[in-house]
Image (cartoon, rainbow, N blue to C red):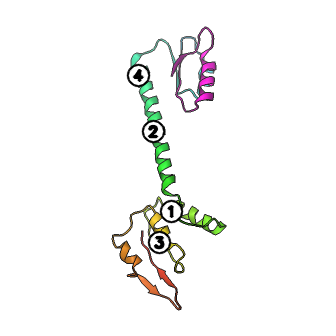
Amino acid sequence: MITDLVMPKMDGIELLEAVKSLKPEAEVIVISAQGTIEKAVQAMKLGAFDFIEKPINPRVISLLVERAIEKQTLILQNRDLRSKLEDKFQFKNIVGRSERMVKIFDLIRHIAPYDSSVLIVGESGTGKELIAKRHPLQQPASLETLYQGELCLPERGHHRKRALRS
């Protein structure tokens, strides 16, 4: 949105406040022939994208509008990616709401963005495979053979540990 600072029924600062209260992510460029440094600072503190003085250079206003659109596009892309990332890290198939499981889920979310090796150990039937499948990093081509016992090491007793590399 582009608004003048001085208008008949409402000034640009009031309009800026109203727009930002309804839609905080909106970009507002304030223009004025009678702008003061105080008004410019006030507009910027209230969230104006920019404050420019008249006379307006068409190339400058075009560049500002282009930058505002680019910023909005980046914000929307960021929201979309965050939403997809949150969906990816939902642990819908894993039952467990204990404090320990919440800590494990937090740990998985924390290490997921890094290119790292992960060793998942635990008793048989504790959900290691579910965790490994939810881990977003590229899994080895031989993951199925891992599950079939290729890298399962016998442990004393009937329990086994699996080394999973993600």
Return the x and y of residue 103 as percentages of the image width and height. 61, 65
- In the image, which residues are magenta? 1-30
Q: In the drawing, does residue 54 fall left or right of residue 103?
A: left
**Nearer the camera: disc 2 or disc 4:** 2
Q: Dot 1: what SS?
A: helix
**Nearer the camera: disc 3 or disc 2:** 3
Q: In the drawing, does residue 75 fall left or right of residue 23?
A: left
Q: Which residue is mark 2?
A: 74
Q: Which residue is mark 4?
A: 62
- Image quadrant where residue 46 sits: top right
> Does the segment drawn in magenta span residue 27?
yes
State the residue in front, 25 or 97: 97
Q: Residues within 10 Å of mark 1 (few under 14, many from 20)?
A: some
- What residue appears at the point 65 percent right and 67 percent down from the top-left corner? 98
**In terms of sequence position, does the residue under pointer 4 or pointer 3 come before the other?**
4
- What residue appears at the point 42 percent right and 72 percent down from the top-left corner? 165
Cβ atoms at labels 2 and 4 below 8 Å apart: no
Residue sitting at the far bottom: 156
Q: Dot 3: what SS?
A: helix
- Image quadrant where residue 42 sits: top right
Residue sitting at the far left: 141
Return the x and y of residue 127 as percentages of the image width and height. 52, 72
- What residue appears at the point 48 percent right and 56 percent down from the top-left corner? 88
**In terms of sequence position, does the residue under pointer 2 or pointer 1 come before the other?**
2
- Per the model, the C-alpha gap separating discs 4 and 1 is 43 Å
Q: Which residue is mark 1?
A: 111
- What residue appears at the point 49 percent right and 68 percent down from the top-left corner? 130
Residue sitting at the far top: 8
Amino acid, disc 3? Glu
